[in-house]
Amino acid sequence: MAISTTIPESWKLPLFWATVDGTRAGNLTEVGPALLVGQMFTTGAAAGTATLNVAVPVGSLALAGNLFGVGSMLYRMVYAFFNSNVTQELWALPVADPSAGTFAEGGINFAGTSVTGSGVFSLYIAGQLVQWTIYSTDTAATIAANCVAAANAIPSLPVTAALAATNSPDVLFTCKWKGLTGNDITLIVNYLGLYGGQVTPAGVAYAITPIASGTGEPNFVNAISAIQTQEFDYVGMPYTDTASMTSWNTEYGFSSGGRWNYVRQQYGFIVNAFRDDYADALEWGLSQNSPVMSTMVIEQGAPSPVWEWGAAYCALAALGFSDDPARPLQTLEMIGIMPALTQNRFSLTQLNNLVNSGLAIQATAPDGNPMIMTEQTQYQFNSFGQADTAFGLLTVLATLQELLKRMRAAITTKYPRVKLVPDGTKLGPGQAAVTPTDLKAELISEFGLAMYDGLVADLDDFKSNLIVEIDDNNPNRVNVLWPPQLAGQLRQFAVLAQFRLEYPPISTS
């Protein structure tokens, strides 16, 4: 029998019998789900209903409030994600507070106040505006009490407010969850300034004690174990402590057991955000070297917290790469994220040095929204400590992920049950068999389609360097050297403006 119909020769009943083969008809369809990792409320009136360490799909902010608790870290991450991307399949992985952690605390003190004019006090807590009216008859104690009432009336704030037992500060803000991340909560007065209509009422004096002293980080052993059979191409998580990043880099890495390892082939990458001054951020960046993690550096004066920056970055990475994995993310805007004021932003020279230290960088668009400038990964050095740019940009991972998934789909769909024979074997028409040359042609065809989609370039060199051969010691195995040239991105346009005041006259002789 020449053609493999899968109908056995022993089937003798008449007349018409047909089998259906869809291996040449389908196309690869990718969902590219995103995952946000953060802490939820497990106790109290605002406790969420989600199960710890179990990823759950989230289709709306209201659902996130029910699952994780309004005002929880994970709730605000979902809020930030949906502000920039409402089309992605989004999941969230809730984790518990660190068992041995402490709550970050800080506050504001109104000692010395002697109000001479009425007005509105504008305080931003982690980028969220808290306002209350101050009257000329108010005392410092009245102002403090009204501050507490105004803050506690906003359930989405990451802090609770209370009058302190002592006067320093007389309004105490306590993060609603334990851990290092609570130290990132900012307290900023009159962010918009005079031209934004925010001015401190005359006679009101205040002093801010930065929120600090939060300690501990979640344990991710159970959470990571629970998602190992699920594919998440884009992961946003707010933790930049060594233990947390090590756990997630191991899960998403290239080493044995990682998602980029041949055994798992799940792929994906992680994004987060890091806040510090220029010098410390540069030093911190140089100490990292993950090819599967991209950390966006933000200024100390940026009101929005790192968990919202990271979630917005994740949303834009998912949005951009789902559309075209080889296209740069530069200029995509993080809607709803508040950048640092102009005088507090990194300079262009500082941004250039920060991106060279393995940090993703952002700037502020003319409309006031932060935008991605370079989606740099932490990767900077090879295993010998030499400078290396191989995995320096997220587009490399996103493009490779797309190409590998396409190739896997083509091979597993078209050749799930075939015989393997050497080149030159005389096969009858329709035989369910392939040769290395057949498979090479398949890979070249897939490359051509990828080139048409703008993912790769240089088909001729790909053909010349592609090797497909049967293993010398295993006649059932094909070994492939697959050498694609990935598409680049227009990231710089360098011009030498070599002007003249006058070109010399053209001689007519």
Image (cartoon, grey):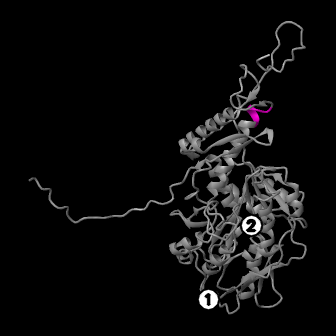
Magenta span: 412-416
Other-residue count near label 2 (Cα within 10 Å), few / some / many at <14 / 14–19 / ≥20: many
Q: Is residue 163 magenta?
A: no
Label 2 is placed on what type of residue?
A: Pro
Q: Is residue 289 above or below residue 106?
A: above
In the picture provided, is 206 more to the left or to the right than 220?
Answer: left
Q: Position of residue 408 (x, y in %)?
A: 73, 41
Distance between the alpha carbons at the discs numbered 2 and 1: 39 Å
Residue 293 can be seen in this image? yes
427 vs 321, nearest the viewer: 427
Other-residue count near label 1 (Cα within 10 Å), few / some / many at <14 / 14–19 / ≥20: some
Q: Is residue 25 above or below residue 354?
A: above
Q: Position of residue 114 (x, y in %)?
A: 65, 91
Label 1 is placed on what type of residue?
A: Gly
Q: Which mark is residue 203?
A: 1
Q: Which mark is residue 238?
A: 2
In the picture provided, is 401 more to the left or to the right than 160?
Answer: left
